[in-house]
Image: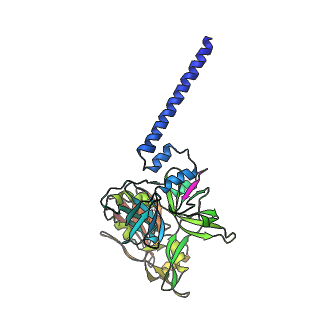
Amino acid sequence: MAKRNGVWKIFTILGILIIAILLCYLSVALYFYFGKPNDIATKLKVWNLMSDQSIGDIYLDASFRVTDGDNAFYGVNVDENGYVVTLASEVDKDGDYKLYQNNGSIYGGKVAFYDKDLNIALLKLYSLKNKEENLSLPYVEIGDLYSSSISFNSSFIVVGDPLSLNNILTVNNVTMYPYVDEITKLVDGKQVVEFVNTSPYYYSVENYTIYSQGGIFNRKGEFLGLVYDYSVSPVNSNVANFFILDAGVIDLVLDNVRNSDEYQNNLVESLVGYDMYELQSYIDYPLNSSSNYIYFNEKWTEVPQDALTKFYNGADGVYLVEDFVYNDFTIPANNFITSVNYNLFSYSIYTKADLLYILYSAEPGEILTITSQNISTSEIVRTRITVE
């Protein structure tokens, strides 16, 4: 009997320990779930035993319908005080917007960050009753689209217009698209390129007309990207590929935007040029079939023969249409940026997005060494820039 009692004591102790552990976990989960109700990522990281539909319902709380009159598009909040990520191609930098939640709340919004080259913008929300009121809204974190796309057994949740039906969709596969993708607009009666995505991701949806598409998330409370374009399958008209814009740059700028009434990045604003992948898209929409003119930077611009030679030779880099001027440093127009040394690493520049991410990452006091080549003389120049 003594031996049997000893075994029961062990089981009793183990049971008490398991219950204690479960109670501790449950108390922590409840604390974050109810004590930090707006922090969706933290809630899901400690309590994620829900269906995709239930998690999507939580993401809807951070989602907005953004309007400027007749035009309506999707946005998602990434800060408790109200900073909504949306497409730059949908907004005007000086515009005023109204943002609608699924609970009936309505807010005003002004552009706080705008990058037309990456096609991404941030709207700062404010109360329509009192612009000085501090907002407290559900929000998500910015995640890594690339890492999420290559994770094993990963699933994704697509959330659309919070005021529409069928606005939550589970996607099992997000893939990097093997080609560039562009969106176009009409200028002077001609179809011209508005935005080129040199690293697009996509997912496929059957019966796609049923669903509203807006932003894509993982199951950890992380926002990965915005849906900006789609194409219908030529084989099955019931299937469409939806293209995703990576939102990672927001993670680089959000703190600076929060701390400034008018965020400005002089390094980024100094860059006026295009990479060779963009040039491919631009020359697919020429002014006429026999000219070297493209519609770039909101005007018709002739592509120099030296730049075309670089393009046809398969070179990678960013061609400067205008002088890159930053403080006392100048890299003249007609130069071709090929690499950047930053934080003890050397980065080859394949696309303009590669260069922009480095420029956005650079902090005051850090040093960038930009290597460029004058495409007329072939002279190699290394420009050492101290960030201010």
Q: Residue at x 53, y 45 (%)?
A: 48
Residue 98, x across and y down, in percent: 41, 66
Residue 264, x across and y down, in percent: 34, 66
From the viewer's side, name the closer residue of 324 and 248. Answer: 248
Range of magenta residues: 150-158
Q: Report the residue that reaches farthest toward the front.
A: 104
The chosen color scheme is rainbow
Q: Quadrant of the N terminus?
A: top right
Q: Residue at x 38, y 65 (%)?
A: 109
Magenta residues, dominant SS class: loop
Residue 218 shows in the view: no
Q: Is residue 72 magenta?
A: no
From the viewer's side, name the closer residue of 261 and 371. Answer: 261
Residue 159, x across and y down, in percent: 53, 59
Q: Quadrant of the C terminus?
A: bottom left
Q: Is residue 178 left or right of residue 326?
A: right
Quarter of the figure with residue 290: bottom right
How many marks the image carries: the answer is: 0
Q: Report the residue that reaches farthest toward the right.
A: 235
From the viewer's side, name the closer residue of 157 and 321. Answer: 157
Residue 312 shows in the view: yes
Residue 23, x across and y down, in percent: 49, 33
Q: Is residue 70 above or below residue 140?
A: below
